Amino acid sequence: MSGHIIEDPHRQRWIVISVAFASFMAAVDTYIVNVALPTIAHYFNVGTSDVALVTLAYLLVITSTLPIFGKVGDRTGFKKVFILGFAFFAGGSFLCGLAPQIYLLVGARCIQGVGAAMLYAVGMAMIPRYIPEKSRGWAFGITATTAGLGVVIGAPLGGLITQYFSWHWIFLINVPVGIAAIFVALKVIPKDTPAISSAGKGFDVAGAIMSFLGLSFLVSALNKGQQLGWHHWGIVSMFIVSAILLVSFILWERRCKDPLLNLNLFKIPTFTFGAFAALFAWSMFAGGNFLLPFYLTLISGLQSSVMGALFLISSIIYIIMSPLMGRLSDRVGARILCSLGMTGTTFALLLFAFTLAMPTLMPVIIYLVLIGVSMGAFVPPNNSLTLNSIPQEILGAGSAASRAFQNLGMVLGVAIYETVFSAALPSSMLSSSLSAAAIPHDLLNEGFRNAFIAGAIMCAIGLILSMLAKEAKNSGPKQAVREFVA
């Protein structure tokens, strides 16, 4: 598939800009929503377990449909899927902004998640498809930078909109952005031919259903376990059904002629270690981003606008670090930088966990600085490490699988952080909006502390996996290529 590589530097830049636009849009949405979650919980008078569904439903749909859209991209070309993704994302955002009830909001987030899955599945895959290998570190760094720029704009904008207008507008603002993105993509993304033939091949519908339901039952059990009780028959049943479905999914994928998730990917050690390291890193990141606004609201008493401005600390550092680390990974190797990034996040989480009870914002500021530096050092090199190990023939499916692992990490991270946090609170307060006046600060601090310690454990595992990954000097082992194409 080397014929897809574009040598014209001007055209390369426009392709990277279009892909980066998708990353920017998704990042804006994520951080606008995170800052507004306490306000949304108060608006609908729900607790953290219910408002967590606003994030979990979005991430769960992305995780479950990414492999499907990766295969669609390989078979129909990337451009169609990419543009359709913007359309679904903008339409879902519009419905979110009109939602009058929490579960309707959750449903609209599912539609938004379908669009995001399309963008994620083929967006990052377009870099190794069109950009020469010597420039891919730069390209990944640019996309990470624009995602960080989305965070810079998203957090304070979300705080201002939530405080001075309405939380509904944090979704409605995506509509004009999405329309503009469609016009940009139509103009700059080249028409491409499918990487593989679709003749005689269908989609793994059974695998898609089993994976989606298995993850849904798992997340639902984690989400409601503390509220209903871990020994409740419904919670136990959901865990059992989830285990059966996920094991069945793996067994089915092994014998399916055209699987949703090609397990041969995991015969490439670099991809395996890199993907699982990303899973744990993004678990920590998403869980912390979900819970930190509640800490700033309940413990620090900050308004939404101030809270959004505070998130600028990690955002600015991240967008400065990302392109530098992307360039540096081309020279010194990605594994070293990934390992350093995971070391930094582990230290940041433990430091914050044991200083968050201090009556000052200094622990938060230090935490945000360290997270910005560490994730900036981890994300671009990890993307380069993982995607460079995938054979060109299945870049769409491989990129989708890689992104699915990141989003699976986000789903589990939000669910685990919320579960660990809620375990410290009285069960009578889990189904209604939290109030700092109603819950003693020592209980709140205990919940926050336990959750961030759990995040540190995730990052320690990610560190070990990053150290085990080896640099891929080509597009993957020849044996793996033969198995993929066969």
Image: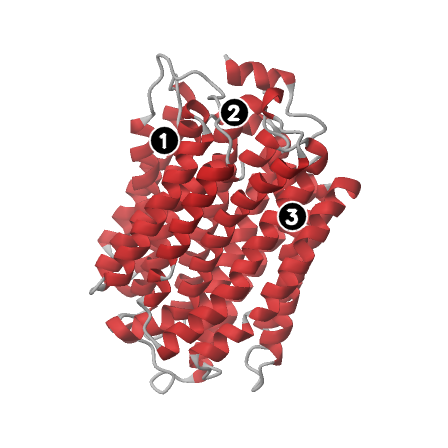
Pinpoint residue 407: horizontal percent, then vertical percent.
Answer: 46, 47
The residue depicted at 61 percent of the width and 70 percent of the height is: 313
Element at label 3:
helix
Along the line of sight, which residue is nearer the eye, 294 or 148? 148
* Tag 2 and tag 1, C-beta contact below 8 Å: no
Along the line of sight, which residue is nearer the eye, 19 or 364? 19
Circle 3 residue: 141
Disc 1 residue type (three-letter): Phe
Which of the 4 image quarters holds residue 100? bottom left
- Label 2 vs label 1: CA separation? 21 Å
Is 263 situated left or right of 45 in this image?
right
User: Residue 48: in sight, yes or no?
Assistant: yes
Disc 2 residue type (three-letter): Ile
- Label 3 vs label 1: CA separation? 35 Å
The residue depicted at 62 percent of the width and 65 percent of the height is: 316
The residue depicted at 68 percent of the width and 53 percent of the height is: 377
| Chain-order first, disc 3 or disc 1 | 3
Q: Is residue 41 above or below residue 246?
A: below
| Chain-order first, disc 2 or disc 1 | 1
